[in-house]
Structure formats: structure tokens, C-alpha cells
Amino acid sequence: MLQLVIHGGAGSLEGKTAEAQNIHQSLCRIWEETFELLKKKTAEEAVIHGIRLLEDDPVFNAGTGSKLQADGEVRMSAALMDGVKNRFSGVINVQNIRFPIEAAALLSKEKNKVLSADQATEFCRKHGFDEHDPVTPARLQEYEQKCSGIHGTVGIVALDKKGSIIAGTSTGGIGHEIPGRVSDSPTVAGTYASSKAGVSCTGVGEQITQQAAAAKIVTRVEDGMSLHEAVSKTLMESNNFNYSFGLISLDANGQIEVGKTAALGEVYYAYHNGEGIETFYN
Ligand code: GLY
């Protein structure tokens, strides 16, 4: 069975109809293109391809269109987890590349699987990643107006015909953070998978990390809970702290769960519900 769920971050778009529509349209287009690939290729190839599309779309806070940190620099992070191979790789605060998820994918083949900062960027250059400026005029304006927030991050979880579950996440952070801040996305709190389930989170990185959200949900499924129970229990516990985050997830049976804590507006998600593509917008 094939299954695919994607997200373009989280936040609150009440009253911002044009932005919500843009996000909805991008998510539908990217879900469709990624699913076409999943029919022919592996979950890993589909997740990498889909996240590249999300990173290239300036409407999302990842890759091109990433938010600027307090010193005016963009630093991006991404992670990829192969649930069957139990293989996590990631890149933290990499700069001036177009596709951070490609760096995470490349690191999955190395002995050392997570690299950060200048050394991560140097690793990318050594492997032929071209110089790319991810700053867009809209993000520069947000930076100048001192906007920060939780609207950001992209992620995909896919199940392929061989039963592989792959989770991937990519983020430009929250904007105006202390330079060098590390979010949940390139950690097992934000991106995790096993042969039974996979999760990608979005929202306030510190809170997702404090809850070890993605790893906890997957472990609960491994220990016998249904995905629905594992997601509900984890979100309920996070509500006790008034945390603000959401997630997409799927299990080996192709069951999809999208969830969020009470404090979060919404998760910008998309998946096929059997009749058509369902998103946060329709
Ligand atoms: N969840 C993304 C971040 O906190 O940067």
C-alpha cells in the first residue's frame, strides 16, 4: 500500500484568505507530484523530491523563503529518517544551499550522520552543492519589521509498496532567533520513524524537543498503541504544558493521523482521504 502525508508548517491564518489559498494550492500540487513519484519509486526518493519542491516554494519557511535569524542570516536545518533501516541523518544551520534535505540525504550514506553550521556548509560545497541565496524580499521585509512566529517548517511522511516508512522535515526556523539556535526538526523529537510509524512535527521547536514528540509517538506505536492513541496521548500530555505544535504521521497499515495541541491554530497539511486531496483549507 502507498501512503503520503505532507505539511507546510503551522500557525494561524484567520482572515488571511489569500495566503491560506496559496498554501493550499502549493500543498495540493506538491502532494500530487510527490504521489506520482511514490507510485514508481521508493518512499525515500519521494520524500526527498517532495521536500525539495516545498523548499523551493517561497510560500514555505524552508529552503528559499526561510526566515532570517536575529543577525540577519538564514540558517536552515533538515532531517531524514528511514524507519526500516533505523537510519537518521540531518543537517543543522547550514547556509546558502538550495536544498537542505539533499544534504541530510547525502549524510545518510556517511558514517557521521548529523553535521552543523560552517562544517555542514563546507561538507555541501565539497559535494558540489552550488551557492544559493535563500532570502526572499518578503522574508527580508518580515525581518526588518521584526516579525517572528511559528509559521514554518515543511515535512513529509511516506509509505511505499515495500513497506518502507520515511519521514523528512526541513525548516528555516522561527525568525529572529538567537543565531545558531537548533530547532526540533533536525532531531529525533521532530523527525522520527520505525517500521511501524513515522512522524514529522511543526510548531515551537523547543516545546517539541521537550516532549520528544516524534520519537515518543513512534515508540508508543512500537509498544503496541494504535497511531491514533499514541498521537492523542502525546498531544494531551503536551496540552498540560500549554505547548504549541502539531504533526503529521502515518503507520504501516497506511493509517494517517494529523494532530495539534490546543494552543496551536492549525497544521497546514495535505493527504488523500480516499475521495480527494484533503487539506487544512477544504
Ligand atoms: N519547528 C521549527 C522550529 O522551531 O524552528
Image (cartoon, rainbow, N blue to C red):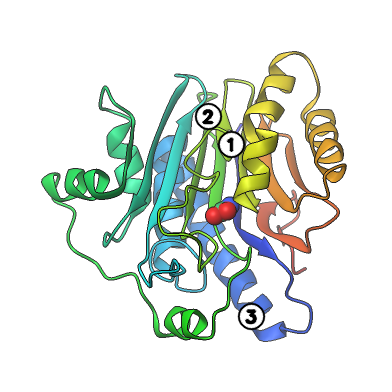
Neighbours of disc 3 within 10 Å: few (<14), some (14-19), many (20+)? few
Quarter where residue 159 is shown: top right
- Asked if the residue at label 3 sits under 8 Å from ligand 1, the reply is no
Q: Which mark is first along the chain, 2 or 1?
A: 1
Which residue sits at x=52%, y=45%? 185
* Rendered residue at 82%/57% (across/down): 263
Judge left or right: residue 248 versus residue 137.
right
- Determine whether label 1 and label 2 are within 8 Å by CB: yes
In the picture of the structure, the residue carrying the numbered disc 1 is 2
Residue at numbered disc 3: 19
Residue 44 percent coordinates (x, y)? 42, 36
Label 1 crowd bin: few (<14), some (14–19), many (20+), radius 10 Å: some
* Picture coordinates of residue 119, whole percent (x, y): 22, 44
Q: Which mark is residue 168?
A: none
Q: Looking at the image, is mark 2 or mark 3 nearer the viewer?
A: 3
Q: Earlier in the sequence, mark 2 or mark 3?
A: 3
User: Tags 2 and 3 in contact by the CB under 8 Å rule?
Assistant: no
Tell me the SS state at disc 2: loop
Q: Are marks 1 and 3 in contact (CB under 8 Å)?
A: no
CA separation in Å, label 1 and label 2: 6 Å
Query: Which of disc 3 and disc 1 is earlier in sequence?
Result: 1
The numbered disc on residue 161 is 2
Q: Does ligand 1 reach within 8 Å of label 2's beta carbon?
A: no
Which element is circle 1 on?
A: loop
Q: Where, by quadrant of the figure, is residue 13 drawn?
A: bottom right
Q: Which amino acid, mark 3? A: Glu
